[in-house]
Image (tube, grey):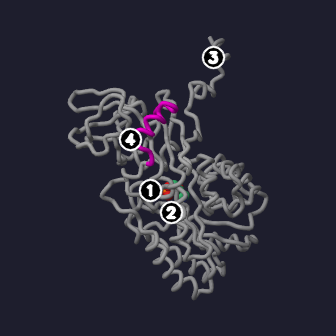
Amino acid sequence: MSSNFPLTHEELVKLTEKFPTPFYIYDEKAIRENMRYFTKAFSIFPEFREYYAVKACPNPYILKILAEEGCGTDCSSLPELMLSKMVGLKGDFVMFTSNETPASEYKYAQAEGDIINLDDITHIDFLKESLGKLPETICFRYNPGQAKHGCNSIIGKPEEAKYGLTREQMIEAYRICKENGVKKFGLHTMVASNELNPDFFVDTAKLVFELVLEVKEKTGVKISFVDLGGGVGIPYREDQKKVDLEYVARKIHELYESLIVPAGLDPMRICFECGRPITGPYGWLVTKAIHEKHIYREYIGTDSCMADLMRPGMYGAYHELTVSGKENAPKDHVYDVVGSLCENCDKFAVQRPLPKIDRGDILIIHDAGAHGRAMGFNYNGKLRAGELLLRENGEVIQIRRRETIDDLFATLDLEVVKNFK
Ligand SMILES: *Cc1c(COP(=O)(O)O)cnc(C)c1O
């Protein structure tokens, strides 16, 4: 996806004079258009809703843009719930899909009327103890175990994954909740990450719809919404193809017509909680080549590191990398493009054919708009990059400043340290 960077070389050079590298930049117009495409693809379901996974890009400016486009949020922690509230989202626009959750976080979600998605059957009692009673709406996360094969490596095999309830537990959980006066029910599953095969999502929907029917048959509970999770991949590599969401929607709709409607369960809301395909392709990490090194391999050292973008180091993930102003130059050099961390996995690109890179060149790391800055950390005393937003009118604004040393030391009491003997 190297072609979609929204600034020319001259514009980018000028921008780096105002905002020194490294920084993230997001394209508001592209994010809005993409969100409209996503919604339109699923408009075949009248009550469709996307809950943007906040963890992918926990910046309130981005969340506000998405909320304006009709999105809710999917949250995994208290700060993410708070960010949602900050941008005016609550109630059934907020899905709280957490695990190993403290009582205080359930209390906050309950007070806002957010939808609580439970990760285990024992959490029914935990929730009841935490809140005094069960909420009116409850959702459960289904782990299909061996019933779902062909899952990919980030989440792994469902039967080895820590998430969700077994099929038998799902039935039992709805029964218990119904007896305890819960009025509205949801069913959630998420069994893949960064999956590019559209049929994978169709198969998942089938599995989930069949369970919805089984729940109704065995407990009388009518599921009113189904959350098919996230996991829709993006083409990080140029030879990969975008998931055809219109195809996915049409196929899931066929299943809906053949399974859900005859069972008298229509209308049932279909939801997704995608992060990656919403903002991933429309955010970039911009860094500068500050060193070159010639040993057994050719290295380019950048002013960023995996503390800003850890996917390559952590998963060996591929991110397209372009050299600003050299987009059309021949790729006649092979480099490892590396960061400054004391970890040899800190490489943005490994043995990558690229144009000749000179010190001072601006490097653009693509598809970093989801699970990019959000996964950053401070190991090695690294300060995380800030975030910029390219507005629809062409203006660029800062939506998060970069971290400072004061931020890094903020959890230390330096006066006490001074007097410590
Ligand atoms: C990570 C996650 C998501 C978002 O995944 P993407 O790959 O960014 O779409 C959604 N739901 C849950 C429960 C998650 O853990």
Q: Is residue 170 visible?
A: no
**Earlier sequence position, callout 1 versus callout 3:** 1
Categorize mark 3 by other alpha carbons within 10 Å: few (<14), some (14-19), many (20+): few
**Earlier sequence position, callout 2 versus callout 4:** 2
Q: Is residue 77 visible?
A: yes
Find numbered disc 3 in the image and state the secondary structure of the residue it sits on. helix
Identify residue for label 3.
417
Identify residue for label 2.
190
Q: Taking 310 as reference, is 218 above or below it?
A: below
- Mark 1 CB near ligand 1 (8 Å cut): no
Quarter location, residue 240: bottom left
Which segment did they paint magenta? 6-22
Cα gap from disc 4 to disc 3, whole angstroms: 34 Å
Find numbered disc 4 in the image and state the secondary structure of the residue it sits on. helix
Q: Taking 162 as reference, is 250 above or below it?
A: below
Q: Quadrant of the C terminus?
A: top right
Cα gap from disc 1 to disc 4, whole angstroms: 17 Å
Cα gap from disc 2 to disc 1, whole angstroms: 9 Å
Categorize mark 1 by other alpha carbons within 10 Å: few (<14), some (14-19), many (20+): some
Between residues 94 and 356, which one lies in front from this camera angle? Answer: 356
Quarter location, residue 141: bottom right
Identify residue for label 1.
155
Categorize mark 4 by other alpha carbons within 10 Å: few (<14), some (14-19), many (20+): some
Identify residue for label 4.
313
